[in-house]
């Protein structure tokens, strides 16, 4: 089956920019995963995350993304759409994640499956709290990640 990486990226200090990290925190609080699944708070590491793609077949990215939609709107993308879309956004880790995915292709580390769950931020100001429309999406995305794992034949155990 190969390994699966669930990677939340973002900056917790910039309110909604930390959405991916908030989702990762909720996943680790609420679920236990088989050992072939790694759940990682990637913060703003960007290109340094390439190390974690070694041997990964399935990658689920969770992030705040600029999609020009209403605040709190969810976006789901798969495959080659993901790095192309991420290269259009503006955030502190914008350069790192698309570059990491590009470098993964060059180094033959690109996962077989890549999926992005993104949310349109409302606030990108300094602050630790998510805006209400973005906070309302955390549990929904957690559920979507767990459902995706089930589709891939991976069972997460509720704690």
Image (spheres, rainbow, N blue to C red):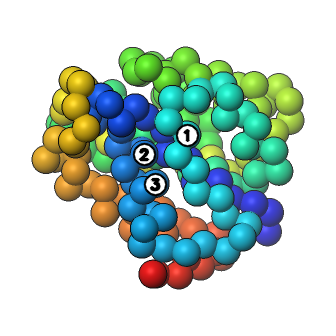
- Verify CB contact (< 8 Å) between mark 2 and mark 1: yes
SS assignment at label 2: helix
- Verify CB contact (< 8 Å) between mark 3 and mark 2: yes
Q: Residue shown at 20%/55% (left/top)?
A: 136
In the image, is residue 24 above or below residue 131? below
Which residue was labeled with disc 1? 42
SS assignment at label 1: strand
Quadrant for residue 125, please give it. Answer: top left
Task: Indicate the quadrant containing the N terminus: top left, top right, bottom left or bottom right.
Answer: bottom right
Which residue was labeled with disc 2? 21
Which residue was labeled with disc 3? 24
SS assignment at label 3: helix
Q: Residues within 10 Å of mark 2 (few under 14, many from 20)?
A: many
Q: Tell me the CA gap for discs 2 and 1.
A: 7 Å
Q: Which of these two is toward me, 27 or 80? A: 27
Q: Tell me the CA gap for discs 3 and 1.
A: 9 Å
Q: x, y (%) of residue 82?
A: 55, 36
Q: Which of these two is toward me, 65 or 22? A: 22
Q: x, y (%) of residue 4?
A: 68, 59
Q: Earlier in the sequence, mark 3 or mark 1?
A: 3
In the image, is residue 136 above or below residue 41? below
Q: x, y (%) of residue 50?
A: 72, 34
38 relative to 106 in the view: left or right: left
Q: Residues within 10 Å of mark 1 (few under 14, many from 20)?
A: many
Q: Tell me the CA gap for discs 3 and 2.
A: 5 Å
Task: Indicate the quadrant containing the C terminus: top left, top right, bottom left or bottom right.
Answer: bottom left
């Amino acid at each position: 089956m190969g390994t699966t990486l669930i990677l939340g990226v973002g900056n917790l200090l910039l309110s909604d920019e930390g959405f991916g990290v908030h989702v990762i925190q909720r996943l680790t609080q609420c679920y236990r995963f088989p050992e072939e699944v790694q759940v990682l708070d990637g913060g703003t590491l960007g290109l340094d995350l390439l190390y974690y793609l070694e041997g990964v077949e399935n990658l689920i990215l969770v992030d705040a993304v600029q999609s020009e939609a209403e605040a709190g709107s969810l976006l789901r993308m798969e495959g080659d759409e993901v790095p192309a879309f991420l290269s259009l956004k503006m955030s502190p880790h914008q350069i790192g994640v698309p570059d990491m995915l590009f470098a993964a292709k060059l180094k033959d580390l690109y996962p077989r499956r890549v999926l992005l769950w993104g949310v349109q931020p409302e606030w990108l100001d300094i602050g630790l709290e998510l805006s209400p429309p973005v906070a309302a999406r955390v549990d929904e995305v957690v559920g979507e990640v767990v459902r995706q794992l089930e589709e891939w034949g991976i069972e997460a155990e509720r704690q």
